[in-house]
Structures are given as structure tokens and as C-alpha cells.
Amino acid sequence: MLYAILCYDHEDAVSAWPEEEEAAVMARLGAVQEKLAAQGRLGPVARLLPTTAATTVRKNGEHLVLDGPFAETKEQLLGFYIVECADLDQAVETAKELASTYTSEGSYELRPLALFKPAPTPVTVTPATVTPAKATPAAVMDA
Amino acid sequence: MSDLAWIDAALTAARPQAMGALLRWFRDLDAAEEAFQDACLRALRTWPEKGPPRDPASWLIMVGRNAGIDQARRQSRQAPLPPDELISDLEDAESAAADRLDGADYRDDVLRLLFICCHPDLPATQQIALALRIVSGLSVKQIARAFLVGESAMEQRITRAKSRIAGAGVPFEPPGPVERAERLAAVAAMLYLVFNEGYSGTGTEAQQRGPLADEAIRLARLLLRLYPAEPELMGLTALMLLQHARTPARLDADGQVVLLEDQDRGLWHRRMIAEGLALVDKAMRHRRPGPYQVQAAIAALHDQAARAEDTDWAQIDRLYQTLERLQPSPVVTLNRAVAVAKLNGPADALDMIEPLADRLSGYFYFFGLKGALLDQLGRFDEARACFDRAIALAHSPAEAAHIRMHLDRLARLKSSDADTALPGT
């Protein structure tokens, strides 16, 4: 079963981390990701730019375009992992492993995927901002 | 991450909101600061074992408010503070209270906190110092280091600034739309001052000041989150990001300034550039141009050029023309002349800056650019006179060193009589 592990956290607290702290956290998260990749379970990983860079299109008749994220919540969606997990228990274990890399007020939301179409990363993406996805678990499910 | 590190980040992030609410509550800056300090101390004691609250700002506001009230009571009679255990059930109370707190209140709290630092009676340096102390929570020692002054001098500067705004009266009624726009404009200008303060200096100085640029960006993002549909705020944030992205390439190994066209663009901070470009894109959709957006667009064009020679100078020239209309100033025209020199050569640029001589007679960059243009035209004696003038006006050893390089080259030219094509500045 493929799971989306959605990382929610206080964006302003995360952006207040000192640089060396941020680098240390990223290194620890990287170690967990490498382990998952070695097990052949890691799909695409994305880190999102801050919500201030977000735009929302409302699906009403006008398709109103609004600045900012869709939801005004205490925690913001900062990024996500696609991971192959045998069951919810394993998904919870994986999220706990990611969570234990740093203390914060945030959460990981685990959402099983209904549909997944792997594709190569488009070349228009700035290479330095995005690391290309490693081989994706070949699993496509129909809703 | 150590306990201290994440708590520190959480407190820093929650500070503007919590301080803003406490200021509204106590209507006194010192009382608000004291209450916030108290709440932080309790956070340091209770969060490591209980874990962080879901909403640190609300937690700090509640605890700070109670601490402040206790403080007032204690001043009337010496009663001990309630033990920490009593605030353990804050979580439930806090979420209820947080829901009651209207989002708009919150926004205006933060804006007010920033706005009182922009009091027109305060000189720019005091505005910046005050904002860094009150809003960012930097220690007097850190601020003093950034400004290269002694700690006691900085302490005095901040105290003076505080007493001045205390006497001025802080506006506590919710601002109307016009007032809010005025406050946002004042705060934006102040944040850009903070940012530029972080940008001046070279070598170790630059290292001490670098954090100010990060801090300005952090506060700009915070403000933009509170007022997400303000294109000028997007422009300001983008401008800072797009300029700050070049920081890793700005100084050489000796701590000397490297000109934009000589920078190693591979060192630029890609993620900052991506964020800046996204914000410029968003701002442009509003069709409400303003000076920050135009400057951000100019910075974006520089950042998007893979090599210096790929820079779209025609577009930059057009943007500077727009800026001349929006915010006419001799300095804007001077900057436009740089683009014109790239497009049409030094003679046109020189014609453009000649009329600015009176108004920019004390401006280092005017003589630096004029010298470089004359230099390119082969008018070496006049160029030398301009460079001498620039050195006399230089604000920093780095600026002087840069001009001296030109002079040395001219001196060599004179001795060798070589006539080579010279790069402009």
C-alpha cells in the first residue's frame, strides 16, 4: 500500500531554526530516507516553498484566485513523502522514525494513496531546489 | 535537535504575536516585555517534559497575561507566584481562548508592534535597533555587535527610543483601511532598513550583520502571512530574497566585495531565488505596481541570468523607467544609467548622469560610476579626478579599496600607455 506521509508543522518556527540546526535536521531526515530507499520503499519526496509563495484557486463558478494557502491552520503543509508500507502499522512506524529526527509542534498525516502515476521529474524544475526522485515503487492503484 | 534549540525557535517564532497581544493587553511596552519574559521562563521549565503546546503563541499569551496580572498584584502585596503545576491544564483553556481570539486582532497586534518601532521622531538607526530588540527579541549584545557599537551605548540608544515612543502614545484602536495601509508602508520601509543594515560591511563585519538580513526576511514573511494579498509586501519579501540569495558570492576570500558581474553564480542560493520569483509572479497578477515590486523584478532579472552577459539590460532599463515614474530620485536615475551604459555605451549614460551632479555631490556611487564611464571613454584624467572624489566619500574600506583598484589600473595605463577595453562597474 502506498502512503503519502504529509508533514505539517509551524512554518514560522521552522523558518526560525538557525542554519546549522536546519542542516542537522535535514541530514537526519536524509538518513531515514536512505534507509527507506535501500528497502525499495521510497517514492518521490517534496519540500514545499513557504505558504507565502502559495496561491489558491477556488473551484467556484468564477474560479477565484486567492493569495496564500487553502487552509488557515496553526500548522502548514511543508512537504510530503510517498512511501510503500505493508500496512498502517508500518506507516506509523515510518512516520515515527521521521518524527524522531527533531522535536517540534508539528505532525505527520498518513494518507493511503488511491491513485499514483509515477513520472520523471519535469526538466523545468530548478535542479538545485529539487533532488530528482529515486526509483519509485512501481504500484499504481485504481480508486 | 536539542530541547533548547526547538524551544528557542518556537519562542522566536511566537514572539511577535505574543508580544503584540500582551502590548494590547497591558498597553505598556515594558510590562508586555516583562510578562513575555516570564512566560518564556515557564516555557523553558515546562515544555521539555510536557512537550510543546500545539499553539505556542496562545500559550505564551495566556501565561504572560497571568504573570503580568500577578506581577501587578505582587507590587501591591508580596504574594508568591502560583506553582507551575497549576498551569498544566492550560492546554484546554488555551485552545478555547485561541478560538475566541479573532484572527484580525492578531494581525493588527503584530502590525502595531512593528509600527510603534517606526515612530517618525525616531532616527532610522533607533527604529531598527528597537525592532530588533522588541519584535525579534535579539539581545542588546547581539544588536550592539551588528551595529559595531559598545553594549552600553546600544542599551542607551534602545532606552532612549523606548522612552520616546512611550511619551508619544501608542494607537490601540483597530486601524481603518487607510491607516492600516499607511502602517504597512511604514513597517515595510523599516524592514528594508533592517535588511540593508545586514548588507553593509565586509569581512567579519558582514558575518556579524548577516543575521539582520535573515531576520528582516523572516519578519517580512510573517507580515505577508498576515496580509497575504498585499502586492507591495510580496515585492518587498521577494526583493530581499532575490538580493540575499547572492550573499554566498558577495565577498571574496579576503572579505572584499565582489561585483555582481564578477560573482560566481553557482554559489547563489537557488531556493531563495525560486521563492523570490514565485512572489514576483504572484505580485504581478494584482496589477497594482509599486516600488518594491519593480525593484524585485529588477533583482529577478539579475538572478535569472545564468551569466552576467545574459542579463536583460533592456528590460532592466524599462523597469528603472517605471521606478523613475513611481518614485523619482537621482539615485534611481543613476542606477538606470548603469543599464543604459550596457545598452548604448558610456556616452549616453554619462549624458544621463551629468544633470545629477548637484544633487549627488556627496554620493560615493555617483563618482564611482562617473569615473568608470569616463574611464571607458578614454578620458583618463577626468576619470582619475572622479575616482579620487569617490575615495574621499567612501563609507567603508571595501568601497575605497574597490575604487583604488581602478586608480591603480589607471596609473599602470599611464605608465604603459596601453589602451585596452575596460569593463564597467
Image: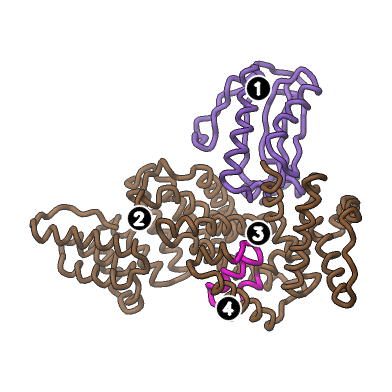
Chain colours: A purple, B brown
Choose mark 2 or mark 4, whichever is in front. Answer: 2
Q: Give the residue type that dot 1 points to.
A: Leu
Q: Which residue is at a point 61% across and 24% down the rendered structure image?
A: A34
The residue tagged 1 is: A36
- The residue that mark 2 highlights is B256
- Crowdedness near tag 1: few (<14), some (14–19) or many (≥20) residues, C-alpha within 10 Å: some
Q: Which residue is mark 4?
A: B122
Amino acid bearing label 4? Leu
The one of B250 and B420 positioned closer to us in this rendering? B250
Q: Could you say whether the residue bearing mark 4 is in a helix, strand or loop?
A: loop
- Both labels 4 and 1 in a single chain: no
Task: Magenta stretch: give its range.
Answer: B115-140
Q: Answer left or right for B107 relative to B266.
A: right
Is B292 located above or below residue B273 in the figure? below
Which x, y percent locates residue B109? 74, 66
| Label number found at residue B223 | 3
User: Which callout, 1 or 2, points to the residue nearer the camera?
Assistant: 2
At mark 1, the secondary structure is helix
Q: Marks 1 and 4: in contact by CB < 8 Å?
A: no
